[in-house]
Image (tube, rainbow, N blue to C red):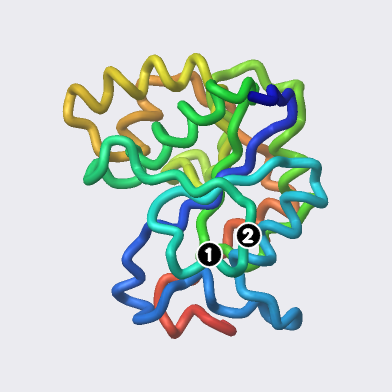
Amino acid sequence: RRMSTRPLLAHFVGGKSRRMGTPKGLLQVPGSGQPIVEALCVEGRRAGFELALVGDATPYAALAQGVPRLPDDPPGAGPLGGLRAVLRFAEANAHPFVVATACDMPQVSSAALKQLADPTSTEAVLAPRRDPNAPWEPMLARYEVTRVLDVLDTALSDGLRSFQRLFERLDVQPLELTPEIELALADWDTPADVGA
């Protein structure tokens, strides 16, 4: 198996999109005509990442051909199961870290992703938050594979299902809120968010 030292970009696509009523990653990025998942793949490659889709990627098979599709591990553990799946995949393929994004984030650019690939961070997680008292943003964050996987396995066996609870157990470095990162954090949860 070919080993890689390139970073891995994981697009989390497993949400049920109940409030949106349609798979969110199929919504079109404003001004581009590209579905969000396709645009995320383009921007990720442009920034030098290898790619993976995490969760049920069935709606996106035609948009991300050749991109590995990783089911949650374990199933039913929510987004932490997706994180464990992609960290195990990264470990097996010698990716040093994983950057996570979600399929409802239409403004993620290669410039924002390059900031997440910055090698100067030494903590287990590099993540933004909108202000010092706000929750961490796990879906525009970088995870160091070995250190996070060890803590995550314990957290899952303890019954944890939330990123915020996981982050309480990890060393997290705040990611600077540059204009590119601020823009990239926009997400679409409901039809009212689209085009807002």
Residue at screen point 73% across, 41% down? 49
Q: Quadrant of the N terminus?
A: top right
Front-most of residues 155 and 44: 44
Q: Quadrant of the C terminus?
A: bottom right
Q: Is residue 130 visible?
A: no
What is the three-letter code of the residue carrying label 1? Ala
Local SS, label 1? loop
Asked if disc 1 and disc 2 are in contact, CB closer than 8 Å, the reply is yes
Front-most of residues 146 and 114: 146
Give x and y (percent) for residue 171. Answer: 49, 19
User: Is 37 on the left-hand or right-hand side of 76?
Assistant: right
Is residue 172 placed above or below 188 in the rendered structure? above
Give x and y (percent) for residue 74. Answer: 27, 36
The answer for how far apart the CA atoms under marks 1 and 2 are is: 6 Å
Question: Residue at the left extreme?
Answer: 159
> Which numbered dot is residue 61?
1
Residue at screen point 55% across, 43% down? 100
Q: Residues within 10 Å of mark 1 (few under 14, many from 20)?
A: few
Is residue 48 placed above or below 150 in the rendered structure? below
What is the three-letter code of the residue carrying label 2? Gln
- Which residue is the site of mark 2? 65
Residue at screen point 68% across, 57% down? 41
Is residue 115 placed above or below 28 in the rendered structure? above
Q: Is residue 105 visible?
A: yes
Give x and y (percent) for residue 32. Answer: 75, 79
